[in-house]
Amino acid sequence: MMTSEKTNAEKIEVFVNECRRLKIKVDPPDINEGQTSFIVNDEGHIVFSLSAVKGVGDYPVEAIMKERKNGPFVSLFDLCRRIDNRNMSRRVLEALIKAGALDKIGPNKSPKDRSTMLSTVDLALNLCNSSSKEKQGGFIDMFADVAQEFKDPDYQFTKPFSDKELLQGEVEYLGLYLTIDPLSRYLDEIDHLQVSKIATLVPSYGGYASERPTGTVAGILIELRRSVTSKGDHLMSGVIMDNTGRMVFTLWRDQIARFEDKLELNTLVMVTGKIGFDERENMKKIFIDKVENITTARQRAAKAIRVYLDAKQLKDDGLAARIREVAETQGGNTRLELAIDNDVSFLIAPTQYYVEPSDSVLDSLEYYVKNRVEVVYD
């Protein structure tokens, strides 16, 4: 079913979310395992189709699968040496890298290698071009496989992509997130924020705007574009995604001024407005009246930020000082509570311990007490 819909990112996303719900792992495309279709590997994981990567298509994947019979690809350079430039263009190679298909053959076998491999594309494509000329001229070195490890140039190492940059590449070329699910950290909180799932919203098709139903959704902002109409009007449009679907929105000049600072790619936003349908995009559309980022939503609805400590940690002057530093340097209006030995009846909440309930504050606290920080709503 996934293969038949591989060009429909929204439907693939629904299938992937259902797999997550059923605890079935969906892996990113893999240069040594992926095919033109979605497959199930020996570990029982679904492997994303290589030809479903935007900008790749079936012909390059068929060439990859044919050459793979001679052995797995072991590096970016090995891939480019063995696939000629008719099937491995810059566009195809960059798409495969950003989609995560080469993660397992990078220098560190990690998604963090994507930036380094992208910076090495020119070097790798030179091998691809040289290999094509040798094959066309009949100059094939019978010892090429033996000597390969000595011929590979050095990678052009660069700073790893941030999580947001990794996510943006996956959305661009897969249409969804696979390596990291940015919505997962918020799922428990979303249940407290009185929002609807996109799939449950019933849009109004035409009619007066005042007659359209109103809804509030919380989702990840996966696209954000600016444009200018033929009349010179400035527009901002985007796509919001939750774990049930997607919807589009368009902002005009006065709305851009009101909401722009709350709209950041690959972050959670809450939007309220009238629910309609965009026939051109074939997708639900929200006519936005209100935007909140997660910090603003927590300020409105959360009771406290709670850190769970055991008695031994409480006696650790260094840990106490670091928590105090977070509170003093990132102050706000949400109470910071310390729960001792998981006993919420024993809370320490000095009046000066009020923080901004932002992701950066939570991440700072999580750095010191991993998986023991909670946003309390009830």
Image (tube, helix red, strand yellow):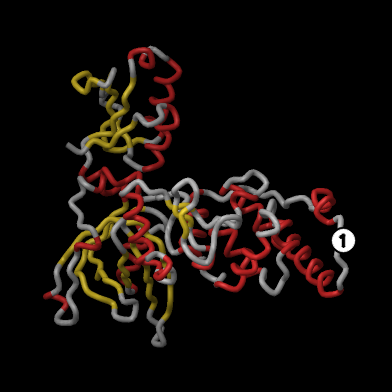
In the picture, the quarter occupied by the C terminus is top left
Give percent across and percent down for residue 214: 16, 66
Q: Position of residue 340 (x, y in %)?
A: 28, 18
Asked if residue 38 lies left or right of residue 76, the reply is left
On the question of residue 172 being in view, the answer is: no
Name the quadrant containing residue 224.
bottom left
Q: Residue furthest left?
A: 211
At x 80%, y 66%, the residue is 131
Q: Which amino acid type is shown beneath numbered disc 1?
A: Asp
Q: Which residue is mark 1?
A: 141
User: 248 and 318: which one is in front?
Assistant: 248
Residue sitting farthest toward the bottom: 230
**Is residue 187 visible in the rendered structure shown here?**
yes
Label 1: few (<14), some or many (≥20) within 10 Å?
A: few
| Residue drawn 34% across the image and 73% down it | 253
In the rendered structure, the answer to whether residue 231 lies left or right of residue 82 reads: left
Q: Nearer the viewer, residue 178 or 374?
A: 178
| Residue at (83% x, 53% y) in the render | 151
Number of marks present in the image shown: 1
Residue at image coords 73%, 60%: 124
Mark 1, secondary structure of its residue = loop
Question: Up-down: is 91 above or below 47?
Answer: below
The percent position of residue 376, horizontal first and vertical second, equals 23, 35
- Seen from the viewer's position, the closer of residues 122 and 244 is 244
Q: Quadrant of the N terminus?
A: bottom left
On the image, the x and y values in percent for residue 55 come to: 55, 71
Is 250 displayed left or right of 53 in the figure? Answer: left
